[in-house]
């Protein structure tokens, strides 16, 4: 090889590689709700086949904040009117004081259960009670008709009493049940 050092009888030395700089990292951030729910919403806008990834993100949000209505609503919407959606909605930890957001979740469960004709599912009764407690007895009119046609009078009696905060032994309630043929 020719080179200046070679001319003087020396060897050509290759420069020694510089050592890799040491990467200093801090602690990893804790999982948090806002980035996960935001990412799931962005993924829904981007289209594509990312349903399972979005479900995973919403389930992580639910683990982090079990009382966040949006996570259950969005996850339930991903399940598109199936019993899986009812399972998601029924995991929500409802409090004693029900809100309109709670009524939305109860209403979604009622609609799905009625559409699928799952009248014997115990969540029909509890969902009707939750929805009716917030929205009033008259909001249940179409569901009452469906359950009457399916002869689910025991469910109707329980829902009526719970929503209207009346005892089934009350004479007015007994009279109402006779008129409606729910006895």
Image: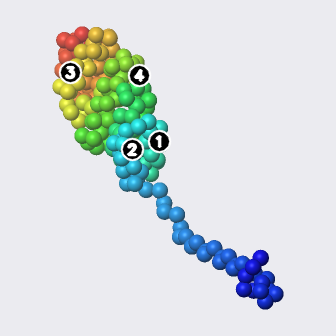
For image coordinates 36% across by 50% down, the residue present is: 38
Q: Is tag 1's residue or tag 4's residue first in the polypeptide sequence?
A: 1
C-alpha separation, residue under disc 1 versus residue under disc 3: 38 Å
Return the x and y of residue 12 as percentages of the image width and height: 75, 81
First reached walking from the N terminus: tag 1 or tag 2? 2
Figure quadrant of residue 9 = bottom right
Alpha carbon distance from label 2 to label 3: 38 Å
Give the CA separation, mark 1 to mark 4.
29 Å
Foreground disc of the pair 1, 3: 1
Q: Dot 1 lies on which element?
A: helix
Residue, disc 3: 141
Measured as percent of width and height from the top left, residue 126 is found at 35, 29
SS assignment at label 3: helix
Question: Which callout, 2 or 4, points at the residue further toward the start of the chain?
Answer: 2
- Left or right relative to 22: residue 33: left
Q: CA distance from mark 2 to mark 4?
A: 33 Å
| Residue 143 x %, y % | 26, 20
**Which mark identifies residue 180?**
none
- As measured in the structure, the alpha-carbon distance from the residue carrying label 1 to the one carrying label 2 is 9 Å
Residue wearing tag 1: 53
Work out how far the residue at label 4 is from the one at label 3, CA to CA, in angstroms: 19 Å
Q: Which residue is mark 2?
A: 43
Mark 4 sits on what residue? 121
Q: Identify the mark nearer the N-term, 4 or 3.
A: 4
């Amino acid at each position: 090889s020719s080179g200046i050092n070679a001319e003087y009888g020396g060897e050509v030395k290759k420069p020694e590689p510089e050592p890799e700089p040491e990467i200093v990292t801090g602690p990893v951030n804790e999982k948090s709700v806002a980035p996960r729910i935001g990412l799931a919403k962005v993924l829904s806008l981007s289209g594509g086949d990312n349903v399972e990834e979005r479900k995973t993100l919403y389930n992580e949000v639910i683990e982090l904040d079990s009382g966040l209505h949006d996570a259950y609503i969005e996850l339930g919407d991903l399940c598109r009117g199936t019993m899986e959606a009812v399972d998601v909605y029924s995991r929500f930890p409802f409090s004693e004081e029900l809100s309109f957001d709670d009524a939305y979740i109860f209403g979604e469960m009622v609609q799905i259960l009625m559409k699928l004709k799952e009248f014997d599912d115990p969540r029909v009764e509890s969902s009707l009670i939750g929805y009716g407690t917030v929205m009033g007895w008259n909001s249940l009119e179409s569901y009452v008709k469906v359950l009457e046609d399916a002869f689910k009078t025991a469910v109707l009696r329980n829902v009526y009493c719970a929503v209207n905060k009346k005892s089934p032994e009350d004479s007015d309630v007994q009279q109402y049940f006779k008129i409606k043929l729910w006895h």
